Amino acid sequence: MTPENGIDAWLRYAALPSDIRIKHKQLSRIVALSSSETSPVYTAAKELQDGINRILNQQIDILFATTIVTSTIIIGTVASFSSAGGNAQEIPKLKEDGFWLSTKGETVQILGQNERAALYGAFEYLSMLAQGNFSQVAYASNPNAPIRWANQWDNLDGSIERGYGGKSIFFKNGVVLDDLTRVAQYARLLASIRLNGAIVNNVNAGYNLLNPLNLKGLARIANAMRPYGIRIGISLYFDSPRELGGLSTSDPLDPQVIKWWSNITTLVYQVVPDLLGYLIKANSEGQPGPLTYNRTLADGANMFARALKPHGDGVVMYRAFVYNHHLDESDWKNDRANAAVDYFKDLDTQFDDNVVIQIKFGPIDFQVREPPSPLFANLRQTNAVIEFMVAQEYLGQQSHVVYQPPLWKTILDFDMRIDGKSSIVSDIVSGQRLNWGRCGYAAVVNVGNDTTWLGSHMAMANLYGYGRLAWNSSDNAVDIVQDWARLTFGIDKTIVDTVTKISMESWPAYENYTGNLGIQTLCDILYTHFGPSPGSQDGNGWGQWTRANAHSIGMDRTLSTGTKNSGQYPLEVAEIFDNIETTPDELLLWFHHVPYTQKLKSGKTVIQHFYDAHYTGAETAQTFPAQWAALKGLIDDERFEHVALRLAYQAGHSIVWRDAVNGFYIAKCGIPDDANRVGNHPWRIEAEDMELDGYKIVSVSPAEAASGGKAIITISKDAPGVAKSALNFLSGTYDIAVNYYDHLGGKSEYEIFLNEKSVGKWSGDLEDKLGHDFSEYLDGHSATRVTFRGLNIEQGNILKIVGQPDGSEFAPLDYISILPQGIVD
Ligand code: GCU
């Protein structure tokens, strides 16, 4: 099978098997009702020609015309169709960006309300063909909401904030890249999932984007994306007037500041006449903003809105992610989750009509489980969008498979009961519930220059799924992943079933082995947000607190004794969350501080649930590599191996997670695991208990990131270390799992021997193979596992590991598990 590198993602248009392909009638000609090369209609015609060639092996001509001529596919806008003499009577009225697709009759009609919509229709038709679906259909498809954007967090230096898929495709060394081929390819992907806008730089913005050279670069980016119907916008740095303009202030009410932004905006529109608008992160995580100048957030937002207003339909996307990250934990009334409503609710009437508030889906920060942000129920007059994060910052950083649509659906399907009436979050952000006109969806997307885009083929299901839900929030998460699997990997049933099963199991598994019952992802929030460090949530001002002590855990967000966060929700919802009896188990610790012995609705105690869930989650992750193995030979080896490597890594890291979190809580509360698993590992040999030569014992921080709290590293930075142990297990066939640390700064080499016979080798080079934010230390980020399977061991055999240090990585080892068949520990 031809190797594939992922560059075409779900648009690879694999040839259908010939027995399916021949069932499709011969297509002869595409008539495109636009000949402008920058028109999405032109793009659509080319895409159809290419796709049909590749999927059906049919060569088909394009005729660019302004009158209807005989054709087998006609593509254009409804208006151009009518003026070309077409009969549009059958076509229902379309919303902006909506399209009509009819495969009935002699001619396939793909007609958009506008040009980009025609392109959406072309992609829809190609998606059907590529899945071998030749059914006769005639329907209109309209978007949920007008705003469907991607937010890049790309920095001008070419790095990407929370990027795990290579370097920026937009910027390098402070300027826009010369070669924007990847940007056009990206626009193609975005258009195929019906996104219509992209903010091209990080919310933590620099002012250098506004220099003359970069303004020209922005024009080139816009030009590269325009043929796909993608408009661009930019993130702005609030203090630019002071720091770039040399003014003495950036006060949003200062006439000179207002003038400065107005001039800059004129310049931006000169180069990008169809600018989407501005994205603003202000007064958040150290960023300056209007509050810095004793003005309100509305003053700040309106300043940008007024600069944009004369130029067209540009909007200010003002982020609701405003909070104090120096919050005092000793005050039990303090709560970061309250911040958005506290800051924005009273300003509801004060924003100009081209200001849109961009609200992260939950009150904190893209955690593995959160309730919807209460701000969705507290704005009536100010339009808003919901912000998701395709980037898996807190969800395994694309090194773990976590398919997010099921998580997003818990938010989109939630009924906020505003004024006692049905107020489903998706109806709020679509504008339907409160009659908003400028609203919808934004998602942080960390595509990079890796050919896989996100650094992981499987992670692309999240980008695809985001587009699908932004268009139609009632789409089903299973249907979405099935379509994506067929398009990405192939239409074979085993492929589709396997990819779907792993994907659908992935978020529940991840929640199980990371943070349960609404306690949040228990990752290290003070460093890279990847591996486990439950203790890092507390004892600092970031406000992602768990308030775990020796007896109890959870945030008391109730009205009577807590932070009153429950009261930020409309009455009926507030009552549910305020009451421990009616709060669903999965959010119990989000809203309540309870003893570890608190009984859940399942009958288990909180602590036993933690222990069990961590075992269950890690067990599920152990099944992923074996499930995936069924696809060997069904998909190309290149992508097969890429995914297999990550799933094996995930299986190993899920055990690190399991043991770290369980170890942390058992140490804290002293309540044993009913099943006696936690802290009891009969198959393990701790590295620190082995006979060591050239190795020394070190403490690991946090302690729970090492089995027994300790690991070994070589004494010398050059000379190898040797760790030996006699194996006192019954003779038989075993898997040997080695837990070690693979951190930044070197690529140690390891070899493992049984009675001096080499049985395996590996190197500490995951930083090259995975691309997530690795750590420089021995900790929960770098802790990992390698497994050698099916080894015959005689009782008394000597196990030996030789570790060769490299750079600052001293061949660290944690423990070795000698696992009888069927046991993973
Ligand atoms: C998170 C993330 C930051 C990001 C911020 C934001 O806190 O860790 O990197 O800047 O969200 O959304 O602005």
Image (cartoon, grey):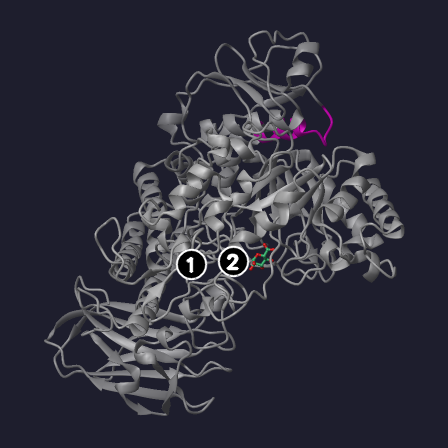
Residue 301 position, x and y percent, is: 73, 45
Sequence-wise, the earlier of marks 1 and 2 is 2
Does residue 153 lie above or below 132 as drawn?
below
Taking the image as drawn, is residue 633 in sight? Answer: no
Quadrant the C terminus occupies: bottom left
Disc 2 secondary structure class: loop
Q: Is the CB of mark 1 within 8 Å of ligand 1?
A: no
Report whether 125 appears left or right of 197. left
Disc 1 secondary structure class: loop
Viewer-proximal residue among 817 and 793? 817
Residue 457 position, x and y percent, is: 45, 50
Report whether 252 appears left or right of 448. right
User: Which image quadrant shows ligand 1?
Assistant: bottom right
Residue 44 position, x and y percent, is: 61, 28
Which residue appears farthest toward the left when viewing the image? Answer: 730
Residue 707 position, x and y percent, is: 31, 76
Numbered circles on residues, count: 2
**Identity of the amino acid at label 2?**
Asp
Report whether 440 appears left or right of 176. left
Is residue 38 shown in magenta? yes
Is residue 343 shown in magenta? no
Taking the image as drawn, is residue 539 in sight? Answer: yes
Q: On the image, numbered disc 1 is attached to which residue?
A: 555
- Rendered image quadrant of residue 115: top right
- Please tell me which residue is depicted at 81% across the width and 56% down the height of the picture: 250
- The reply to whether the C-beta atoms of the residues labelled 1 and 2 are less than 8 Å apart is yes
Q: On the image, numbered disc 2 is attached to which residue?
A: 335
Magenta-highlighted residues: 35-48
